[in-house]
Amino acid sequence: MRMLFPDCADAVDPAEVYADLPGADGRPSVRLNMIVSVDGGTSWNGVSGALGGPADKALFQVLRSLTDVVLVASGTMKAEHYGPAVLPQTAQDARRERGQTAVPPIAVVSRSCRFDWDAPFFTAATERPIVITVTDADTDDRARAAQVADVIIAGEHDVDLTRAMRELGARGARTVLAEGGPTLNGDLARARLLDELCVTLSPLLASGDAKRIIAGSTLDELERLRLRSVCAEDDYLFLRYRPARD
Ligand SMILES: NC(=O)c1ccc[n+]([C@@H]2O[C@H](COP(=O)([O-])OP(=O)(O)OC[C@H]3O[C@@H](n4cnc5c(N)ncnc54)[C@H](OP(=O)(O)O)[C@@H]3O)[C@@H](O)[C@H]2O)c1
């Protein structure tokens, strides 16, 4: 991977480039990682996989290897057939040395709390998954979730994501890697919980009606971002932004 900004370098290690994430007050820091086609689509035929290439997939793994918890919305977890996080042994060893679990647990956000409880996401996990849901969810579904996952109740009808982040922090998480989808991202953005946006610009045109990175109602105010770094490989651009809140 080459770095184009803020410095120019022929070969950089993504694990070093992405090692820093600013702390957040009273909650874990939240980094969002998304891939988007040049024309702004986040999926093609319903999934994002075709947008990625080897360098993007490698970065996806590096970001997972750095985080305490992965956060995903139920729509993406189901559409992309999420299983538990899998990392190479070297990454697992490095995590243990840093005092982290060998792989990050995955927390899934759902209002309905309806899942296939026999899916590998639950049954093959070495780190117990986390289900973040609401009191409106059916009591039986919540009880079923508790058999295979840690359950966080954060809100009545919608998951209050600020509360959910605080709950994850209380369980020891200092960093959260959000992996979408756009609906969840919109809620994170409206709650001003996004501390870093990692956007991979994929050299593809997709067209169609795929959502943008952030979906849902318009923000009350435009959020100004600062460019943190730009890297490139195989015509893919790896952009990293942080909110200009200070
Ligand atoms: N390009 C990329 O990097 C990328 C990354 C991720 C996903 N994607 C694509 O994005 C698409 C899915 O995104 P999407 O926007 O349709 O759905 P999504 O955000 O993945 O999932 C929406 C679902 O998540 C739950 N949810 C989200 N916010 C919630 C809140 N505040 N409170 C309670 N529940 C909440 C609800 O689940 P329940 O229905 O269970 O209540 C809701 O129906 C897929 O096509 C996927 O391939 C692309």
Image (cartoon, rainbow, N blue to C red):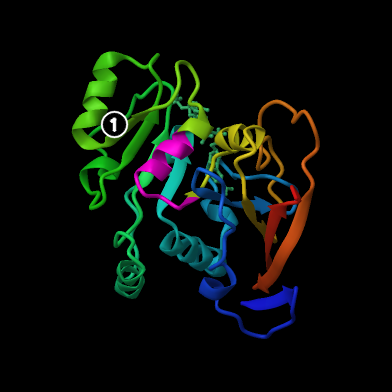
Is 33 on the left-hand or right-hand side of 136? Answer: right
Residue 10 lies, in percent from the top left, at: 67, 85
Does the magenta-highlighted stretch encompass residue 170? yes
Q: Which residue is identified by label 1? A: 116
Residues shaded magenta: 164-176
Residue at the image position 70 percent from the left and 61 percent from the top: 203
- Residue 78, can we see it? no
Is 97 on the left-hand or right-hand side of 239? Answer: left
Secondary structure of the residue carrying numbered label 1: loop
Residue at the image position 34 percent from the left and 44 percent from the top: 171
Q: Nearer the viewer, residue 116 or 109?
A: 109
- The vertical placement of 27 against 134, above or below, is below
- The vertical placement of 181 against 2, above or below, is above
Is 159 on the left-hand or right-hand side of 188? Answer: left
Quadrant holding the N terminus: bottom right
Residue 42 lies, in percent from the top left, at: 63, 45
Is 86 on the left-hand or right-hand side of 169? Answer: left
